[in-house]
Image: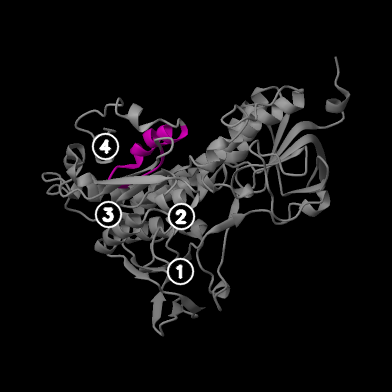
Amino acid sequence: MTDPERDAHDYDLIVIGAGAVGENVADYATRRGARVALVEAELVGGECSYWACMPSKALLRSGHALRAAGRVAGAREAVTGAIDAPAVLARRTSFTSDWDDSGQAEWVASAGIDLIRGHARLVGRGLVLVGDRTVSARAVALATGSHPVLPDIPGLAAAAPWSTREATSADHVPARLAVIGGGVSGVELALAFSSLGSSVTLLARGGLLGREEPFVGELVTAAIVAEGVDVREGATPTRVARAPDGVVTIELDDGSRLEADELLVATGRRPALDDLGLDAVGLDAELAVDDTMLVTGTDWLYAVGDVNGRALLTHQGKYQARAAGEAIAARLKGSRVDDAPWGQHVATADHGGVPRVVFSDPEVAAVGLTEAQAREAGMEVRAVEHELSQIAGASLQADGYAGRAKLVVDERRRAVVGATFVGQDVAELVHAATIAVVGEVTIDRLWHAVPAYPTISEIWLRLLEAYGRPE
């Protein structure tokens, strides 16, 4: 039997943006029988594959490995040479396939998804203009990601600063690098280029990693200062200029001046909604979505990942994409949509179960709410902390191991709502904490989750002991 509504359109679903998020929306909808097209103006695979997650972590890894070896007696004596910056850059480039997306495009074809290259604009309900071609679909999903924000500092734009794109794709290591921004990208890239041989100055008006627990910024600042990064907290640039010889001068609000060969601006990101044609479908340049990623006020348009502003993290965007792809396919078929909290077609974890990792050294791994956020949410909170240096598994990882862990507990439910770990190799601890938060596992039940000895996971037992059992 034919479906007149389906036959009237070129596709069931058009996904605008073929990054990690768009690929997942398209894949999950295709698996459920939808006819899907992906539209991409740049490289298939998107920001994470070519200019963010993968290349930035490749730039960091060699320095991490070198420092880790230097913290273990016997290994440190074997580490006698300096880091090979060209080899690190070459390894980074291998992870981006030299910015060639042919492999990703082959995957799209193998998944049964059509790829349309070009810039897409909405021109009506279910109508997408790509170049001079208009294609139609019963549903459209926006997965265009986010753009870096350039602060309003006189002379900054004219000085041609690096964004994270230029930094992660750099073909050289500048002798002097200035970084504006004390968030995740600023911290990671400051450490990466310091490891590669740059003299790095990090300007952080509000301190480092200020959205996390207070001890996070303290420990990370101390560590990267020890590695040679000049961290200037409270510093505010007032003017920027690049001279004909390429040297960048940054004037600060305390009257001092800083010179650098390159300037990286990492002061946040905003949803990429420019020139998408939202006005053509009666929408403003800011989108609200429900937990299935359906745009408020529509029954056909979805916004998934960074573009909806909910949680600007690749893994969270992919989580949203899986839910949205399933929800879109279900609605197209007229099937029931499971949109209750924690259902198949929703991204409930966006509201309090978001895991995040800063690949600094020490690493920062956290999930859910900080203590301050939990109190602001009106919870009756109790928090406990413990030094990771006192854990046998941590001491085996590094001589003089330094780090800290914290649990935030909702006392009414006796359930963990937040966890934070700072230390070498703590990134792999966060998924256990994520399961505890998302699963609403009670403190009483966590006593029966026995950590293997000697591993860093023994920190869970020590945190439970600090919390205590009821009398």
Inspect the image, locate mark 2, and give the three-letter code of the amino acid beneath it: Thr
> In the rendering, at what x and y percent does residue 40 appear?
66, 44
Check disc 4 and report the residue beneath it: 468
Q: Which mark is residue 168?
A: 2
In the rendered image, the vertical position of residue 168 relative to residue 263, given as above or below:
above
Could you tell me if the residues under marks 3 and 2 are in contact, i.e. CB atoms within 8 Å?
no
Q: Secondary structure at mark 4?
A: loop
Question: Considering only order in the chain, which callout, 1 or 3, is on the residue closer to the N terminus?
Answer: 3
Q: Secondary structure at mark 1?
A: strand
- The magenta region covers 416-438
Inspect the image, locate mark 3, and give the three-letter code of the amino acid beneath it: Ile
Check disc 3 and report the residue beneath it: 83
Image quadrant where residue 439 sits? top left
Q: Is residue 367 visible?
A: yes
At horizontal 27% and vertical 26% (from top left) the residue drawn is 450
Q: CA distance from mark 3 to mark 2?
A: 18 Å
Inspect the image, locate mark 4, and give the three-letter code of the amino acid beneath it: Gly
Q: CA distance from mark 3 to mark 1?
A: 23 Å
Q: Is residue 90 visible?
A: no
Nearest to viewer (mark 4 / mark 2):
4
